Amino acid sequence: MIHHSSIVDSKAKISEKVKIGPFCYVGPNVHLDSNVELVSNVHIEGNTKIGEGTKIFPFSSIGTQPQDLKFKGEKNYLEIGQNNLIREYVTINPGTEGGGSKTVIGNNCLFMISSHIAHDCKIGNEVIIANNVPLGGHVTIEDSVVIGGNSAVQQFTRIGRLAMIGGMTGVLKDVIPFGLSIGNRNYLQGLNLIGLRRKKYENQKIMGLDRAYKEIFSSKNLHENLTKINGEYKNNELVKEVIAFIEKDKKRPICSPQS
């Protein structure tokens, strides 16, 4: 169903059961999978693919030119997965040549009002980004992350799986998986224990992660601390995930507890 007031380019790929409400614009290189719904006043352009069951609310702008002065019109892409909720005034930009030319969003995410996903971001599944949260370019958000309202995430930052960012946090440093981070300039407050229990991880594994957390951050030399515990938790996949995250990019600063 396409409302008569909407403009949908004849070259756009519109699958079955797509609903396009009043005053929307859909560009020529857009692909909408089945059961996508554009409520009204939605603008979608560029090489943008939107997965099945995603619902986009009024005044969202999807696939428009990256906010990057280095962008010179090169071919780029935006890929949004299935069953996402994209609320009012959300903006999502495609990639740039310097970041692989593609922005990617997973499945079952919620982007609340006025959140912004910049160029070359990689967003996992079941991510919740609250109102007025901008993500800078090249940010990586792993699965099941929650970012509280009015926070901001600096470019190139990584946030690990099942981490939680408190409201009004300035995220400048990478947050480990399962971390709980707050502050005007973010620091670690502890572990997202509630989130881990909700995911039904064994209590023994969670307790092991809690012990390893204290050892990893026992001093400011994280990589030296990791060498001391590397074999101790080899059967705990939660600890191994945290270690792998820290070791993956040794150039990036890791968010740590306040001293």
Image: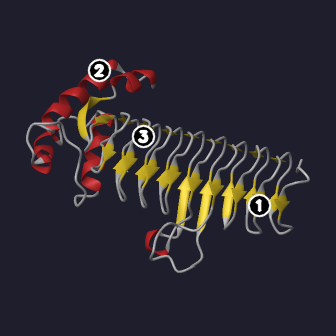
Q: Is residue 167 above or below residue 224?
A: above
Q: Is residue 240 above or below residue 105?
A: above
Is 159 left or right of 215, judged from the image as shown?
right
Is 183 left or right of 68, judged from the image as shown?
left
Name the residue: 38% across, 26% down: 196
Count of labels in the image: 3
Label 3, label 2: how far apart the Cα atoms are: 35 Å
Query: Is 161 or 136 nearer to us in this picture?
Result: 136
Q: Residue furthest top?
A: 203
Residue 32, image quadrant: bottom right
Q: Residue furthest right?
A: 4
Q: Mark 3 vs mark 1: give the one in front.
A: 3
Q: Which mark is residue 257?
A: none
- Residue that badge 1 annotates: 26
- Residue that badge 3 annotates: 150
The amino acid type found where label 3 is placed reads: Asn
- Residue that badge 2 annotates: 204
Helix, strand, or loop for circle 1? strand
Query: Is 20 or 206 nearer to us in this picture?
Result: 20
| Upstream in sequence: badge 3 or badge 1 | 1
The amino acid type found where label 1 is placed reads: Val
Place of residue 73 in the rendered image (x, y in percent of width and height, measured from the top left):
57, 79
